[in-house]
Image (cartoon, rainbow, N blue to C red):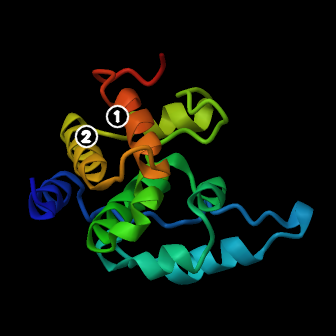
Amino acid sequence: MGNDKVKDRICESFPMEPCPLLSEVVAATSNGQVEIPRELLKRFRGKKWTEILLDDWINIAGIQAIRVYLSPSSFHYYLPSLLMSVLERPQYLDWGLEALLPQNKGRKPKGEWWHEYFACFTVEQRLAVRLFISYAKSQCGHCSEEEMLANCAEEIWQLKGSASL
């Protein structure tokens, strides 16, 4: 399977409208952190997911840090830009896989953020995610970190629509 098939499925499954307002970006001023929210707003606000490049993601922060500042629905909206971008630059496959995994030590689908995020996906979008994971897995080296991430993601996204184990 080539990455063109994966790209086509992602484009068909994820609408470009409506674009989130990003008013829910958390300005975490309580701990003095304003740089990540500022960069998020600068690079994402008012843009469709098709206008966001991998360099936008990379120049903000890591996936786990970015996720802290976006609502589940906003992260879901911009996810296809990341998935499409890493198909072009496979050395960043781990970024795409990280975006599909829960942000906890056991990679278990739990917590309010994760449940809201997972619930955003339509059946067609879940199929596109599964296709992305299959492609990513085919590109990973044996026993690599990416393969481990792909295996975790495959387990979670094959749950037939369930957001929890």
Image-based side of 41 in relation to 101, left or right:
right
- Where residue 55 is drawn, which disc sits there? none
Horizontal and vertical percent for residue 14?
A: 24, 55
| SS category of the residue bearing label 2 | helix
Residue located 56% across and 60% down the image = 63
Horizontal and vertical percent for residue 110?
A: 58, 26
- Please say if 165 is above or below 125: above
Q: Quadrant of residue 133?
A: top left
| SS category of the residue bearing label 1 | helix
- Packing grade of label 1 (10 A; few <14, some 14-19, many >=20) is many
Horizontal and vertical percent for residue 80?
A: 32, 60
Question: Mark 2 is on which residue type?
Answer: Arg
From this viewpoint, which residue is outermost toward the front?
A: 142
- Report the Cα–Cα distance between label 1 and label 2: 7 Å
Q: Nearer the viewer, residue 127 or 4?
A: 4
Q: Are marks 1 and 2 in contact (CB under 8 Å)?
A: yes
Question: Mark 1 is on which residue type?
Answer: Glu
Residue, disc 2:
130
- Where residue 154 is drawn, which disc sits there? 1
Residue located 33% across and 22% down the image = 159
Image-based side of 1 in relation to 11, left or right:
left
Q: Is residue 45 visible?
A: no
Which numbered disc, 1 or 2, marks the residue that appears first in the sequence?
A: 2
Q: Is residue 129 visible?
A: yes
Q: Nearer the viewer, residue 108 or 145?
A: 145
- Please say if 156 is above or below 3: above
- Packing grade of label 2 (10 A; few <14, some 14-19, many >=20) is many
Image-based side of 48 in relation to 143, left or right:
left
Q: Quadrant of residue 16?
A: bottom left
